[in-house]
Amino acid sequence: MKSIRWRWHLDEMFVKINGEMHYLWRAVDRDGDILQSDVTKRRDKKAALKFLKKSMNRHDRPNILVADKL
């Protein structure tokens, strides 16, 4: 059940896969559980919006969205 203060923390990390740099996007809830993760080759607006849309379709929309300069 969705709590009153449903909050997501969004972050991204650089990961190296087979010698190539990729970006790992994550959405984490207030309990520290990973709701959604995605790996992309690009770090741009299109990749961020695609990740957010996919996350919000799979889970409910958060009341608060915390992003670290994303």
Image: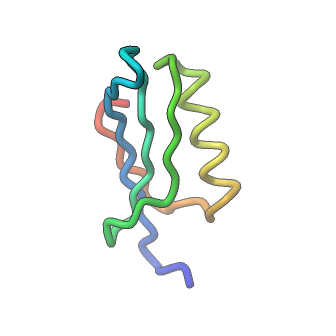
In the rendered structure, the answer to whether residue 36 lies left or right of residue 10 reads right
Way the structure is coloured: rainbow
In the rendered structure, the answer to whether residue 3 lies left or right of residue 67 reads right
User: Residue 11, image x and y in percent?
Assistant: 35, 41
- Vertical arrangement, residue 16 with respect to residue 56, above or below: above
User: Residue 67, image x and y in percent?
Assistant: 35, 41
Q: Please give the name of the residue rendered at 32% of the width and 66% of the height, measured from the top-left corner.
A: 32
Which image quarter holds the N terminus?
Answer: bottom right
In the rendered structure, the answer to whether residue 56 lies left or right of residue 29 reads right
Which is nearer the eye, 67 or 51?
51
- Vertical arrangement, residue 69 with respect to residue 4, above or below: above
Residue 14 found in image quarter: top left
Q: Please give the name of the residue rendered at 36% of the width and 52% of the height, measured from the top-left corner.
A: 9
Which image quarter holds the C terminus?
Answer: top left
Q: Please give the name of the residue rendered at 35% of the width and 49% of the height, measured from the top-left corner.
A: 66
Which is nearer the eye, 61 or 25?
25
User: Residue 68, image x and y in percent?
Assistant: 29, 37
- Vertical arrangement, residue 35 with respect to residue 39, above or below: below
Total numbered circles: 0
Q: Please give the name of the residue rendered at 41% of the width and 20% of the height, measured from the top-left corner.
A: 18
Outermost residue, front direction?
18
